[in-house]
Image (cartoon, rainbow, N blue to C red):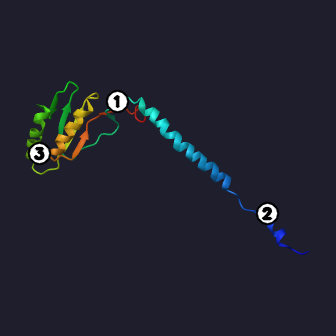
Amino acid sequence: MIRTKRSLAHKQISGINITPFTDIVLVLLIIFMVAVPSLTARQNKGFLFPLPKASANATLPTTPIIVYLKVDGTMRLNETPVTFATLSQLLGQEIAVRQGEAVTMVIRAEKTVPYQQIITTIDIARNNGINQIGFGTQQTDTAEVGG
């Protein structure tokens, strides 16, 4: 029997064709890329703020400077009552007492303290050379973690 080019062209391919699979995967990828941001935005819109609870307690290498902020506007630097006007001067004195030691500041604010008060406190601390700033939180119960 004589073989021609035409008979070779109709030979079956024994490999797996993954083109339809690739098409489906790409369509699903696009669907998830569009759907997920809208789902998470809907969840975060109802996120209520009284936050501060954390499951982990960090230990600090040195005794930190603690600034307490209350909703009524009162502040304390460690145990000393302060205002935003006097906070910078008292932070400078506290840093001078520690003489070159790495200074850490912890802000312990009530849940509903206006965000601007916290930012102002951070600005004053950074202007005084404090770059290690943390936030005090309450430890959550183990049943609440992840939920």
The residue pinned by badge 2 equals 12
Q: CA distance from mark 2 to mark 1?
A: 64 Å
Q: Is residue 124 left or right of residue 138?
A: left
The answer to whether any part of residue 63 appears in the image is no
Identity of the amino acid at label 1?
Phe
Residue situated furthest top in the rendering: 72
Of circles 3 and 2, the one toward us is 2
Of circles 1 and 3, the one toward us is 1
Name the image quarter holding residue 108.
Answer: top left
Tag 1, which secondary structure?
loop
Tag 2, which secondary structure?
loop
The numbered mark, 3 or 2, whose residue comes first in the sequence reads: 2
Residue for point 23% across, 35% down: 118
Name the image quarter holding residue 80.
Answer: top left
Crowding near the residue tagged with mark 3, few <14, some 14–19, many ≥20 C-alpha atoms within 10 Å: some
Crowding near the residue tagged with mark 2, few <14, some 14–19, many ≥20 C-alpha atoms within 10 Å: few
Crowding near the residue tagged with mark 1, few <14, some 14–19, many ≥20 C-alpha atoms within 10 Å: few
Q: CA distance from mark 3 to mark 2?
A: 82 Å
Residue for point 20% across, 31% down: 69
How far across and down, in percent of the image, does residue 37 sit? 48, 40
The numbered mark, 1 or 3, whose residue comes first in the sequence reads: 1
Q: In the rendered view of the protein, which quadrant contains the C terminus?
A: top left
Q: Which mark is residue 95?
A: 3
Q: Which mark is residue 31?
A: none
> Nearest the camera: 5 or 129?
5
> Nearest the camera: 20 or 74?
20
Q: Which mark is residue 49?
A: 1
Tag 3, which secondary structure?
helix
